[in-house]
Image (cartoon, helix red, strand yellow):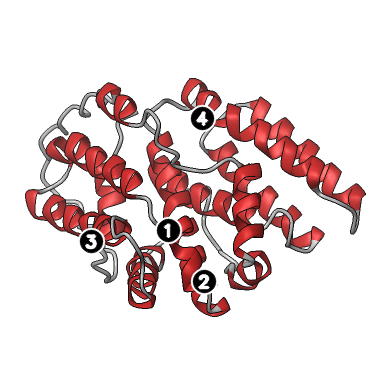
Amino acid sequence: MSLSVLTLAALLVGCGGEEPKPAEQPAAPVAEAPAAPAALDLSELKASAQGVTLVPAPMEMQKALDKAKIADTLESLVQSHTFNLDAQDPDVAAVRTGVLLADTLLTVKSAAPEKLVERMKAVQKGMTTLKAGQDINATIDSLIGDIQNLGGGSRDEVVKQLDEMHAAIIPEIEYEAGEQITPLIQAGSWLEGSNLLAAAILKANRPEVANDLLRQPAVCDYFLKYVDIAGKAKAPDAVVKQLKTTLEKLKEISSKPSLTVEDIEEVKKQTDTVLGML
């Protein structure tokens, strides 16, 4: 399966509008469709990811949220997504699943049990669509059971299990669904996580914690590298240029020594536009 950079480009460029209607089939015979493009060589992208945390481990994330004192604020900001996870295009399903994964990881200790179970089931459905493997589904089933049995008790054990799943999920997906799906899951998680963190920081009026939570220039570099590798073969030059401009703006913000309220608002604005197209 080839990776469609046009999917990510359409999401990140921020150019809205209705999807074009399919053209009517001509009466005359049409030329044979060109062969599908060869799978991308992502070895350079994987090499660039060394030492870059694209999606923080749940335990590490919870410590950061506790320190920043925005966990409860985050829960109030998560939207009820109505994604179609049965999409024919697995690239779209991958980005959407990444968004749902971020919602789950960021609210694992603060969401009401029934809401957290709902989010975990949505992630599970996405993983099933992506053919990510039975091990991941079984782990999510176990987590759902633990949450349902806990009631209002401590969720530290659930966080620990999510930590274990986090460590195994990317290799499992790459093995079962193909390594070309994982950058799109990571992109969805990164975008949703950045958006929710920026919104929570603004709502809680705690701009001082943005330096620890939103400065991720290395992650921006990773997705810029993705565009360089995939964009050359998959997207028109104008789309690639605009996509790079968007990512470079986020990198510019996250590279500052200290973020202002205006910077945080810009991160939210940039990611709002993208997520609104999903």
Image vertical order of residue 68 relative to residue 38, above or below: below
Q: What kind of element bears circle 1?
A: loop
Task: Look at the numbered discs 4 and 2 and tell me whether their residues touch, using CB distance below 8 Å.
Answer: no
Q: Residue at x 15, y 54 (%)?
A: 239
Determine whether, in the image, residue 29 is placed left or right of residue 225: left
Mark 3 vs mark 4, CA separation in Å:
28 Å
Q: Percent from the top left, x then y, of residue 215?
A: 38, 55
Q: Amino acid at mark 1?
A: Leu
Determine whether, in the image, residue 110 is placed left or right of residue 40: right
Residue 239 shows in the view: yes
Q: Residue at x 42, y 58 (%)?
A: 214
Mark 1 vs mark 4, CA separation in Å:
23 Å
Residue 214's mark? 1
Nearest-to-viewer mark from 1 and 3: 1
Q: Percent from the top left, x then y, of residue 201?
A: 51, 71
Q: Residue at x 29, y 70 (%)?
A: 18
Crowding at dot 3, Cα within 10 Å, few <14 / some 14-19 / many 20+, comes out as some
Task: Look at the numbered discs 2 and 1 and tell me whether their residues touch, using CB distance below 8 Å.
Answer: yes
Task: Look at the numbered discs 3 and 2 and tell me whether their residues touch, using CB distance below 8 Å.
Answer: no
Residue 170's mark? 4
Image vertical order of residue 134 relative to residue 70, above or below: above
Task: Look at the numbered discs 1 and 4 and tell me whether their residues touch, using CB distance below 8 Å.
Answer: no
Q: Residue at x 45, y 39 (%)?
A: 53
Name the residue nearer the viewer: 41 or 193. 193
Name the residue nearer the viewer: 160 or 174. 160
Residue 249's mark? 3
Name which of mark 3 and mark 2 comes first in the sequence.
2
